[in-house]
Image: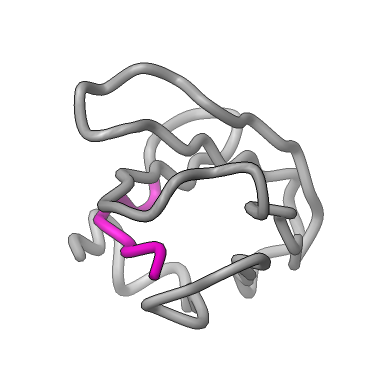
């Protein structure tokens, strides 16, 4: 997990590993976006949100996924999550 701007944003990704739901939270008051990729960097899901979002991941296969959390200007955090 890489916090690109850790001094400005408090982020939470849970649970990890996950099964049918994956939750993303950020402490800013800006519109943010989460993008979920497969291990080959193909975009699978993209969702805009404010403060928190819960993604329905029941259709995804077990494995490792990459994510990017971004605001209007830049990537805030990126990392890996595991579906079990």
Specify the farthest residue to the right: 50
Residue at 18 percent across and 60 percent down: it is 2
Q: In which quarter of the image is the C terminus?
A: bottom left
Q: In this view, does 76 lie to the left or right of 4?
A: right
Q: Looking at the image, how many numbered discs can be counted on the residues?
A: 0
Where is 30 relative to 29, above or below?
A: above
- Residue 78 on the magenta span: yes
Display coloring? one colour
Which residues fall within the magenta stretch?
76-84
Q: Main secondary structure of the magenta part?
A: strand
Residue 20 percent coordinates (x, y) = 65, 66
Taking 35 as reference, is 58 above or below it? below
The N terminus is located in which quarter? bottom left
Quick check: 68 above or below 14? Answer: above
Q: Where is residue 58 in the image (x, y as percent from the top left)?
A: 67, 54
Instruction: Locate residue 15 relative to residue 37 in the image: left or right.
Output: right
Q: Residue at x 74, y 54 (%)?
A: 56
User: Looking at the image, which residue is at 75% across and 65% down?
Assistant: 51
- The residue most toward the top is 42
* 39 displayed left or right of 27: left
Residue in the foreground of this view, choosing between 52 and 5: 52
Query: Which percent across, then down, holds residue 78?
Result: 30, 50
Is residue 72 part of the magenta span, yes or no? no
Front residue of this view, candidates 61 and 51: 61
Left or right of residue 21: residue 37: left
Horizontal and vertical percent position of residue 61: 45, 45
Residue 22 quadrant: bottom right
């Amino acid at each position: 997990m890489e916090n690109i701007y850790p001094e400005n944003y408090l982020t939470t990704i849970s649970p990890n590993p996950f099964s049918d739901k994956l939750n993303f939270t950020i402490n800013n008051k800006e519109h943010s976006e989460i993008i979920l990729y497969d291990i080959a960097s193909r975009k699978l899901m993209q969702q805009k949100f404010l403060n928190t979002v819960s993604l329905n991941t029941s259709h995804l296969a077990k494995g490792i996924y990459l994510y990017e959390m971004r605001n209007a200007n830049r990537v805030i955090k990126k990392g890996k999550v595991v579906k079990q």
